[in-house]
Image (cartoon, helix red, strand yellow):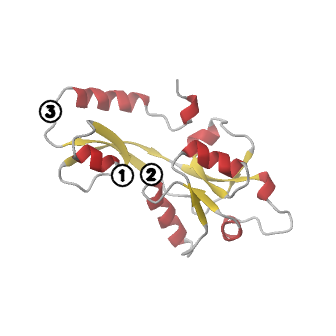
Amino acid sequence: MLEQKLDAGELDFAIMAGRSSKSSILSQSITKADFVWMIAESLLDQGSPQDLISLLTQHTLVTLPAGAGTTRILDEWLLSQNIYEIKRITCNNWSAVAGMIREGIGIGFLPKGWMENGADSTLIQLESHPPLPSLHYAFQWRRGDIRNIIPTMQILVREHINFSLRPNDIL
């Protein structure tokens, strides 16, 4: 949706996962995000296998919706594990995804920076072999837009982008 709005001139720029495939949009890589699998302690059953694949088959996957950039890395990872069907519940907000995982609705993955920053000590990190792929983000703008705001915003975004902050932490 952001790409469509950018292409239609409704947005001046956007930060999106991956590069645009549209020739009318330029993309400049700015950062990457890593993710970790998380589960609520209440879902861990001492009598059952605790490996990630077993847990994914037993519980619902809580994740962002299909249009999110994370869908690509999730699908890639699931296919590498020979998982073709899985029960999912989706939400378009990272904080809500984290809340549903915390409440034991299912398991999922969150930005690694959140967890390293001590954002949620009630969740347990699950080992993942292989780990989820990194998700690369790009600053995107319309080709031919030569306004000064574009390079100025690119500089500001590079200086301030931070995947260790949760939306509620941003002032």
Looking at marks 1 and 3 on the same chain, the residue that comes earlier in the sequence is marked by 1
Disc 2 marks which residue? 135
Picture coordinates of residue 27, whole percent (x, y): 27, 45
78 with respect to 149 (left or right): right
Q: Which mark is on residue 18?
A: 1
Q: Is residue 50 left or right of residue 53?
A: right
Figure quadrant of residue 81: bottom right
**Disc 3 designates what residue?**
146
Q: CA distance from mark 1 to mark 3?
A: 22 Å
Contact between marks 3 and 2 (CB within 8 A): the answer is no
Q: Residue at 73% of width from left, 40% of height from top?
A: 121
Q: Position of residue 145 (x, y in %)?
A: 16, 36
Amino acid carrying label 1: it is: Gly
In terms of depth relative to the viewer, which is nearer, 97 or 50?
97
Q: Position of residue 128 (x, y in %)?
A: 62, 60
Q: Quadrant of residue 147?
A: top left
Q: Is residue 44 above or below residue 143?
A: below
Residue lying at 63% horizontally and 35% vertically, measured from the top left: 117
